[in-house]
Amino acid sequence: MENTKAPEKFIVAIGPQHPALKEPGHFEFTVDGEIVTNATARLGFVHRGMEKGTEDRNYVQDLYLMERVCGICSHVHAMAFALGVEKLAGVQAPPRAQAIRELIGELERIHSHLLWLGVAAHEGGFDTLFMYTWRDRETVMELLEILTGNRVNYSANVIGGVKIDVNKDQKDALKYGMDFLEERTKHYMKVVTEDETFLGRTRNIGLMTKEQAELLGAVGPTARASGVERDVRVDSPYAGYDMFPVKLVTEPAGDLEARFVVRINELYESYRLVRKIVSKLPDGELTVKVPRRIPEGETISRVEAPRGELFYFMRSNGTDKPDRIKVRTPSLCNWASVLTLAVGHKLADMPMILAGIDPCFSCNDRMVTINRGNDTQVWSWEDLRKYGIAYYK
Amino acid sequence: MANLMEKLKTWARVNSPWAIHFNSGSCNGCDIEILATLTPRYDVERFGIKLQGSPRHADVLICTGPVSLQARDRLVRIYEQMPEPKFVIAVGSCGISGGVFQGCYNVVGDISEVIPVNVYVPGCPPRPEAIIYGVVQLLKSLQE
Amino acid sequence: MPTTKKIKVTSADILANAHKALQPWTLSETTPEENRLDITVDASNIKNCVQALMDVKWGYLSAITALDRAEFETAEGTTERTPVKGKGNLEILYHFCSGPVVTTLRVALDYQKAEIDTICDIIPSATLYEREAAELLGIDFKGTPNTEHLLLPDDWPTGVYPLRKTFTGLSKKQKLGNKEK
């Protein structure tokens, strides 16, 4: 594949797919020279029809379904769902269960942030960092496996509580793991805030002001990196966050560097929380009884996924199957904000800016449509990524 | 002469297949375990298998997901662009029956409804070791 | 480093602010759960309501839920429920969040005339939510900047709204693109 730069037109030989085939562009950028003037998204490769699917399955089956909205943050989905059903049923899971929910939630946040750190580094061409973070991430995958029996899709939740407990050996493993990861994380913070090449691609790039973040409804670390004090664990504590509160982490700068720094600082907070929960886990039962048929009602369940606020609206009708489950994932909020934000930025910055919101990367094979004057090209994501790296060489 | 060429081709394929990965609508659980096989701990590349981006150079297609209707035609196109002989490994329960999504309105389910499949690796998601085992099973079957 | 005096705002205050801002257009109001306020308004007033909340900087738009409030009848001797023709309606819920409080604007719409003004000129990021509700439940957001499918495939049959209770799925042939394998 060759890139030849002409003064007005950018000619790119298209990758594997033939240009004549109409490829549904995942993202579409319109550019004027180097600057993006419009950006839209077309999601749908991962649309499965789950919300409708919940209506044909009972609540217990739906718990297993909702876990698989996203493989990276399956626990928060199951937790949001279980908490919602418990509210509709008028019951509360016991404290030990809520604390274990929080524990797994924070371990999931650690694995997700480390995964993202590697992927975002890869987008910028820093593949060594990708290898290191994914190797270190294996530590937390192992811990999750020791606790729940699975590396991905831990399935710790049941409606009414949790189905796993934590014993002394597991507690020791957790403490040891957190110490190891904290030490490694200090190194990542150094790279992200001091490495010249890295800063060249992140400092003052992708700026989103506090006002923009608030108006566009950005959530999660993306919003907090613009100084917005928004975190569901702090604003509206759920599960164990009353007993083990989290400190709000924000950065004022609003650029890509801030988005890296916020997530690394959140890692430190998660390590602290895991240690705290392990040392002060309350005694008691793991589940509470929940009726099979859930009384009629509506509830809203909000939790803080690694990517931001996860919103569940749930409607029950007195049977053992829900009437409507609406899931608004944090990535949808952040897509909306970043697409508006992309306007005015350079095309070469798009891979890092899009990676900066920590999107749930559905296809590695995402396609990008570039509109330039009367000329439309289809690039693969890989092409866009390499374009960004080459631009900054 | 033709027989010798066949033997050489099989040898080359068995010892160093080039693979392409495609997500047909999965939740990413399987994809991150496939990515994990590339990392130092599992290091699938020591078996000679190389993950790269073009269907035109691929011997093996590693496919995850329950084939969403949007991804369906794309999957067929990628399969058609692969040169013969070509093989497909379906990773994850979704590719077998649709997994938990069976019956949902926007998925086909079984990948073999859309393209032929040689190896299924069950699991939700399967561990990296299981994925590597699936790949090795395919390589062994090529030797026969 | 400048210090700002932090005034402790209670959720009761936050709820009161929402109630006050939306008073002129409130048809009815309930508090279904702690920290939740549901306000029913008429479709013609949606822009006024959203603008009112934005004017007092009341939180952010978190989600838009579209519902099919069909009425069901159960076939005798079974648990099979089917939607009754001519009964029921659609409903859109605009969820705004501020701290622990969620204020939901509820708008009822007829199946036959499911239209409402877009709010994208006030909140540009609402476009993704409006696109989703439009394709899944068949609601027409007048003036919305983008009406392309967000989630459904390009070859999805027109006029078929999967989240309506009357939709029961596609045939296998349709799912395979109406091609024989």
Image: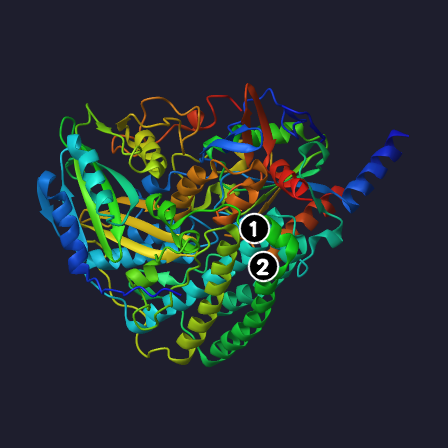
Between A342 and A133, the one nearer to me in the picture? A342
Q: Along the horizontal axis of the image, is C173 left or right of C27?
A: right
Disc 1 from disc 2: Cα separation:
9 Å
- Give the answer, above or below, for where A160 lies relative to B28: below
User: Local crowd at mark 2 within 10 Å, few (<14), some, or many (≥20)?
Assistant: many
Whole-percent x and y of residue A327? Answer: 33, 46
Q: Which residue is mark 1?
A: A202
Q: Nearer the viewer, residue B33 or C33?
A: C33
The chain letter for the residue carrying disc 2 is A
Is C162 left or right of A119, judged from the image as shown?
A: left
Q: Is residue B104 left or right of residue A237?
A: right
**Dots 1 and 2 on the same chain:** yes
N-term mark: 1 or 2:
2
Disc 1 marks which amino acid? Thr
Q: Secondary structure at mark 2?
A: helix
Chain letter for mark 1: A
Query: What amino acid type is highlighted by mark number 2?
Result: Val
Q: Residue A6's x, y, as percent? A: 68, 25
Q: Position of residue A290 (x, y in %)?
A: 24, 62
Q: Are marks 1 and 2 in contact (CB under 8 Å)?
A: yes
Q: Residue at x 37, y 66 (%)?
A: A101
